[in-house]
Structures are given as C-alpha cells and as structure tokens.
Image (spheres, rainbow, N blue to C red):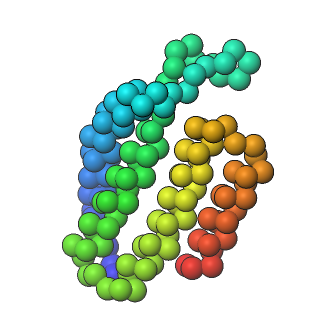
Amino acid sequence: MTISQVDYFFLFVVSCVFVGLLTPLMRKIAISQDILDRPTFTHKSHKNPVPYLGGVAIIIGVIIVSYIALIAGRFTLNNFWLATFVLGPAVVMGLVGLWDDLRNLNPLPRFIGQRIAGVLETQQV
C-alpha cells in the first residue's frame, strides 16, 4: 500500500481536528468523574487540579483515523493485522500511562507493562 506525503499530511490534519474535538469531551468527563491531577508541593509545579484523559482523546483519535484510512484505502487482511500490531502496543502503553496517572504506580509495574508492549511490537513488525 503506497500513500503519498499529501495523504499523510491530510491524515495528520484530520487526526488533529478529531482529537481537538474529543479533548473538550474528555475534559468534561474527567471533571465530572473527578479524574484530576491534584498538585503536591513536593512533586507538581501546577497550582490547580488538571483533568486527565487528554491522552485518551489522542489514542481514540489516532486509532479511529488510522482504521478509517485503512478501510478507505486498499483494505487487506494483512494491512489490518499490520496496523493492529503497530497500534495495539501503543494503546497498551497509553493505558499503562493512564493507570499510572490514576493509581500512581511504582516504577516496576509501569516498566514491565511498557516493556511487554514494546516486545510485542518488535515481534510483530
């Protein structure tokens, strides 16, 4: 499957717009569900709570635009699995990051989760 640089730029712009539309929704959800990063004087530099879930908007936007582009282009099962094996570990790493944000994980579980995602990525591509 060949894709031109103009197509890549178009997908980039569509992703940015889609994520830009999702971000306020995720912010509302984060505030309503009290999913906030509360500052601590020893570790955080911000003074007011900051909503999490911006990364979730990015993950959703990139995944949706990637699969739409795949379906709109030359869809093959091989291309589908290639995209899945590239995007899947990225989603796992994003979810580990979100889990760390919400539960303040120790470095070891975070490292293990991200390492597993990285190993899966290199094994599939």
User: Which quarter of the figure is the C terminus placed in?
Assistant: bottom right
Q: Residue at x 59, y 38 (%)?
A: 101
What's the residue at 44%, 72% (across, down)? Answer: 84
Tell me if residue 30 comes above or below residue 2 in the rendering: above
Lateral position of residue 37 relative to residue 61, left or right: right
Residue 90 higher or lower than 45, as above or below: below
The answer to which quarter of the image holds residue 79 is bottom left
Question: For residue 117, which quarter of the picture?
Answer: bottom right
Task: Residue at the far left: name it.
Answer: 72
Residue 56 locus on image (x, y percent): 43, 46
Image position of 114 with respect to 20: above or below: below
**Residue at the right extreme, as displayed:** 108
99 w.r.t. 122: above or below = above
* Quadrant including the N terminus: bottom left
Left or right: 26 as drawn, with respect to 71:
right
Return the residue found at the far front.
33
Q: Looking at the picture, how far across and down is residue 88, in whole percent? A: 49, 66
**In the rendered picture of this protein, how many numbered marks are placed on residues?**
0
Q: Nearer the viewer, residue 17 or 99?
A: 99
Residue 17 at x, y = what percent?
Answer: 27, 45
**Residue 25, x across and y down, in percent:** 30, 36
Q: Residue at x 26, y 81 (%)?
A: 74
Instruction: Give the quadrant of residue 73.
Output: bottom left
Q: Can you see residue 51?
A: no
Q: Residue at x 67, y 66 (%)?
A: 116
Query: Can you see residue 30?
Result: yes
